Image (cartoon, grey):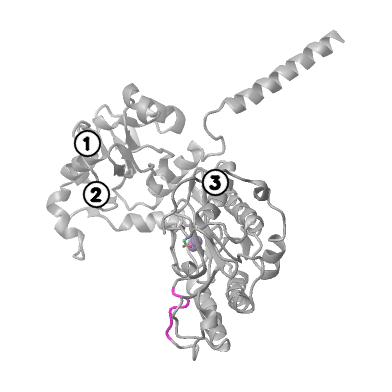
Amino acid sequence: MKLFNKRLTLLIVCLLSGFFMANGQDAPADVLTSGFHKGRRDAVREKLPNNSVAVFFSNPVRNRANDVDYIYHQDPDLYYLTGYREPHAVLLVFKNEQSGQNEEKYNEIFFVQEKNARAEMWTGRRLGDQGVKDKLAIQNTFNGSEFEKYQVDFQKFDKVLFFDFQNDVRDNPQDPADLFSLISQFKTKTGYQSNTANLGTEPQKNNLDVRGLNQIMSELRGIKTPEELDLIRKAVFISTVGQVEVMKAMKPGLSETEIQGIHEFVFKKYGSEYEGYPSIVGAGNNGCILHYIENHKPEIQSDEMILMDLGAEYHGYTADVTRTIPIDGKFSPEEKAIYDLVYKAQEEAIQMSKPGVSFGQLGKLAKDIINQGLVDLGIIESADTRHLYYPHGLSHHIGLDVHDKGTYANLEENMVITIEPGIYIPEGSKCDKKWWGIAVRIEDDILITQDGFELLSSFAPRTTEGIEAMMTQPSPLDQFRLPTLQGRKRK
Ligand code: GLY
Ligand code: MN
Ligand code: MN
């Protein structure tokens, strides 16, 4: 009995300490592992041409105003290859093993921003070189100040691959190892300045290559690994829950801004750090603006539809999901006619999706269905009529970017793409007025499987019947009341 008690006590202590440790963590546990990032660096190395080096810089810090910067977002390629989320860094991946001054061997070098207690007190923790070695397991890491004197003979390579610079990086004169300085030092080491004239349409007359890396990164990033799929599934699920909660809460008189807020609150509730792109919430005619991000209409009207295109970014990976719903919970006959046509185009394209089918074939299928449907509804004269009612493409990759890197020939297993047809009929269009102001986009995210597809965003209904049924459900927000905002109303 005593022994049992001791064991029980021990078990409880272990369980509790596990609980507190888990709760004591100050960062999420389900992020990409250092093994994933190492695997991706090896995959880049595999694809590099002989005797070459690939160079990846971090994104610049962008100033918003005075001493406030925009929220920092790492360059997705650098994040993919390292997991590093801080600015002022450069990664070199060598095709072949290199020998250092003391005969040490290496095939990659990473330069990162130095630790600095004062700066960290204001703007957040830094890993520093040792932190990168410990947490990201990139052993050949140095502080950025080492880059200038580090002996890399760029001239000896057949190719030095990098993404060309946009010349939009500010210098911090107090920091000799900021991104501006790292780029300047790289340009000096490679002779970039004197060779930039050759980087345009003319054939290369030197070893600098600003084209090849995009193809390599597109081939890699377009095919998702199991670790990436886990995060994408979460991002997509979170985004569909946002759509469902808004369907329940929708009623005339809400503002576009607060509808956006409901989605984004759901994202945060699940631990999603950001939106994958600026949220698009457009009621009525605003839905005809494809990337409408003002979202500032104060009161949506009962006879309008609202187009909501939002994606949660979860640990770096973003969803891209659009639902279009009637404010009063019931599609009018015209709204339903347009909606059902977009749905038909989407559904047929989804059903056709499998490895070997081309992006072009999918896009043509959807466009043909929409054009014929617009003819049948009397909105255009013939299926060949040039029009702007469906002005965008059908599909793109999603991942670390909403319009993610990937190839656009044939679908392949483990690609994740959107299927997103739409019809937009702005006020004043050359058709019967009854169609004016109707804008419908339905956007879903699918995983291409070995012999077909998996619909990742099925949690949010997308038929008119499914949406209408969901909109009859109660919402916890029905009880959410806030004090009135006082102040003078301006006419
Ligand atoms: N949310 C942007 C797009 O659908 O491509
Ligand atoms: Mn999209
Ligand atoms: Mn979208």
Q: What secondary structure characterizes most of the magenta part?
A: loop
| Residue closest to the far right | 1
Residue segment shown in magenta: 386-391
Farthest residue in the left direction? 194
Task: Indicate the position of residue 168 as horizontal and vertical percent values.
Answer: 24, 49
Task: Name the residue tied to disc 3.
Answer: 484
Mark seen at residue 172: 1
Q: Nearer the viewer, residue 446 or 215?
A: 446
Q: Residue type at mark 1?
A: Asn
Label 2, on which residue? Answer: 168
Q: Amino acid at mark 3?
A: Thr
Q: Residue at x 70, y 69 (%)?
A: 465
Q: Residue at x 52, y 32 (%)?
A: 27
Label 1 CB less than 8 angstroms from ligand 1: no
Residue closest to the far bottom: 381
Residue 358 can be seen, yes or no: yes
In the rendered image, the vertical position of residue 450 relative to residue 71, given as above or below: below
Q: CA distance from mark 3 to mark 2?
A: 44 Å
Q: Is there a contact, CB below 8 Å, between mark 3 and mark 2?
A: no
